[in-house]
Amino acid sequence: MATYVLVGGAWLGGWCWKPIARHLRGQGHDAYPLTLTGLGERVHLASPQVDLETHITDVVNIIEFEDLRDVVLLGHSYAGIVVTGAADRIPERIAQLVYLDSEPVPDGLAFLETQPPEIRQHTQPVVTKHGDGWRLPMPSWDELENVYGASLEGLGEQQRELMRSRAVAQPFGTYTQPLRLANAVLRGVLPKLLITNSFPLAQVKALIASEHPWFRELAGPEWRFVELPTGHWPMFSRPDDLAALLIEIPPMGSTRYRVGCHPTSENRTTRQSDDASSTVAHPPKLCAAYGARYPTVMSQSPGKVGKIVPGRWARGIATRAPTLFTEVPSPPSTMI
């Protein structure tokens, strides 16, 4: 059984994971939906001093104080930068990093710097005028779709009402403080999964092929990719499918097989290539131990590589998260 720590994106709290957590626990897994400082039920702790390091510490603390190990650490949207920072602090406790419609932000960049220029220009005046200079209120649906480029696919009136009623302003320091990473070597070893919801494949492949420094990391053997076609908030638009996907994709090995845990020969990670006949675009190199534990994952399911999912995140893709994905049934199971 797996242990999941779930971190929502901007304006959201642990409440957004309620259906997902219920499903995971119902299947015997441990689930820890996390509310970051200043959001959700912790809105009373919001202040100008809340920044990215505060949110990284939130994640580190729940893992350490609950003594969690072999954690599947998931970050949605903005929280991608948060889980990247947390995994850098405590890599020995993480089994796998999951980016949900999100991205790994490079060392030294702030989240706001990863956004297209038009979003950066739009955001600061809003913070100044409507957020007392340190808060970013949740934009209108029209702004989210047409300014931020976020797909609202799958969000009906009920889901929108729930989000709007519980969303709170984002402490803006979390957007402007640069990420600082110390474990660059381990970052290239820790297994990572990117779950795409609305990113077009053609542009992503071009960025990876061009060896753009922001996207070069995604070509590494530690990456796997899954598609869950929907809008930017799958925890609301496809909660059952998202939960099933998380259960279906087990952690990539346990602590004793992961590099950097114990410097003994029997605990070093051994990797092997997938079968050359596998019908995938970029076959990952998986741990030999992982293949023994989960042989069905080593046998790739057939899929039509190259489907472009409709979505409105294409605008500004050069400064947003990349991914590769395959066409899969619902709920999805094919990995590349």
Image (spheres, rainbow, N blue to C red):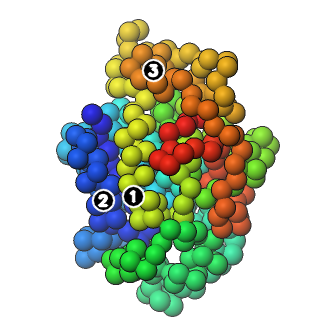
x 41%, y 49%: residue: 74
In the depicted view, which residue is nearer to us: 68 or 150? Answer: 150
Furthest residue toward front: 329
Q: Earlier in the sequence, mark 2 or mark 1?
A: 2
Task: Say which quadrant the N terminus sits in.
Answer: top left
Residue on which the image places disc 3: 295
The answer to whether residue 159 of the structure is visible from this angle is: yes
Q: Secondary structure at mark 2?
A: helix
x 69%, y 33%: residue: 281
Task: Say which quadrant the C terminus sits in.
Answer: top right
Task: Give percent across and percent down for residue 188.
Answer: 55, 32
Task: Give percent across and percent down for residue 192.
Answer: 50, 38
Work out whether 235 lies above or below 228.
below
In the depicted view, which residue is nearer to us: 301 or 71? Answer: 301
Crowd tier of the residue under label 1, counting other residues whose Cα lies within 10 Å: few below 14, some 14–19, many 20 or above: some
Q: Are marks 2 and 1 in contact (CB under 8 Å)?
A: yes
Residue on which the image places disc 1: 239
Task: Give percent across and percent down for residue 216.
Answer: 68, 40
In the depicted view, which residue is nearer to us: 113 or 233? Answer: 233
Q: CA distance from mark 3 to mark 1?
A: 27 Å
Residue 19, numbered label: 2
Q: CA distance from mark 3 to mark 2?
A: 29 Å
User: Does residue 177 appear to the left or right of 61 in the view shown?
Assistant: right
Q: Secondary structure at mark 1?
A: helix
Task: Give percent across and percent down for residue 46.
Answer: 32, 74
